[in-house]
Image (tube, rainbow, N blue to C red):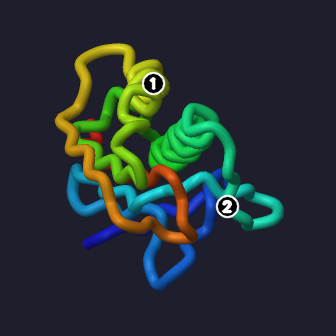
Amino acid sequence: MKKIINTPDAPAPIGPYNQAVIVGDSMFISGVIAMDLQSKQLVKAHIKEETKMVMDYLGAILKAAGCNYDNVVKSTIFLNDMNNFVHVNEVYASYFKTDFPARATIQAARLPKDANVEISLEAKIF
């Protein structure tokens, strides 16, 4: 059986999906972009600010499931420009206190709403 996770503390899905789904002891968090919660508009700022916003939203989704960044085992980062890799890494690294999760980083030709960064996570619930 699966459990659906949605929180008002992160952007609502912009399509037919949920913020996260838990199956057994695994949680799969959909890709998150830097959307303003009130206006529901994409925030275009410096890549570090956008990445922080995305990571904060992911943290809110983890929290809604009773988890935190220690539960994350895999992340996937999509960038519109691989030249932003260093800036994203700097912000991303600050969210993990212990071992980093496995990760893939990909430059995508285009992201939803023309975002600069999108991040999805996989976590284990313990």
Tell me whether the residue at label 2 lies in contact with that at label 1, contact meaning CB atoms closer than 8 angstroms: no
Q: Nearer the viewer, residue 37 or 125?
A: 37
Q: Is residue 82 left or right of residue 64?
A: left
Residue 20 on image: x %, y %: 41, 61
Q: Nearer the viewer, residue 121 or 50?
A: 50
SS type, badge 2: loop
Q: Report which quarter residue 71 is drawn in.
A: top left
* Cα–Cα span, label 2 and label 1: 22 Å
Q: Which residue has dot 1 on it?
A: 95
Q: Is residue 70 left or right of residue 48?
A: left
Which amino acid, mark 1?
Tyr
Which mark is on residue 42?
A: 2
Quadrant housing the N terminus: bottom left
Q: Nearer the viewer, mark 2 or mark 1?
A: 2
Residue 77 on image: x %, y %: 34, 47
Q: Is residue 63 visible?
A: no
Q: Residues within 10 Å of mark 2 (few under 14, many from 20)?
A: some
